[in-house]
Amino acid sequence: MEENFFERVYAIAKQIPEGKVTSYSAIAKALGTARSARMVGWAMNASHNRDDIPAHRVVNRKGLLSGKHHFDGTNLMQQLLENEGIEVVDNQIVDFEKYFWSPDVTKE
């Protein structure tokens, strides 16, 4: 079940447009498992060896880069977001609502 769950998380993460972010909880809700935001985080952590998963675009519900310590280098997550035009100050996305992307479960 866990592997299948992770793949469902990845299917949504792959849909996040460049220059946008979503949250662990938004992905969990889109999967119909609203209380599994932490498991979504585990899936994102496990995806770092896969180039096809834009894990840097998944942040916590307040726009904090809570998963940044799972990326190689000190500020890689922030650098990847800034390369897409997203401003980050003190590990927080500036104007989070402007960049927030809500998953559409009908695409899955």
Image (cartoon, helix red, strand yellow):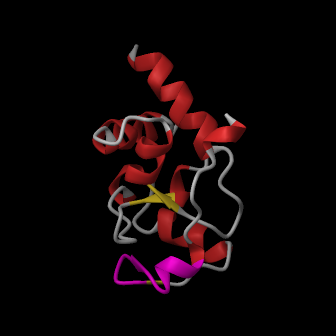
Q: Is residue 71 visible?
A: no
* Residue 83 position in % (x across, y down): 66, 74
Q: Residue furthest top?
A: 1
**The C terminus: image quadrant:** top right
Residue at the (41%, 42%) spot, across then down: 28
The residue at the point 59 percent across, 63 percent down is 101
Q: Nearer the viewer, residue 80 or 32?
A: 32
Percent coordinates x, y for residue 102 in the rendering = 57, 59
Left or right: residue 78 versus residue 81 is left
Q: Is 96 one of the magenta-colored residues? A: yes
Q: Nearer the viewer, residue 62 or 102?
A: 102
Q: Is residue 21 magenta?
A: no
Q: Quadrant of residue 90?
A: bottom left
**At x 38% / y 66%, what residue is drawn?**
65
Total marks shown come to 0
* Residue segment shown in magenta: 89-98
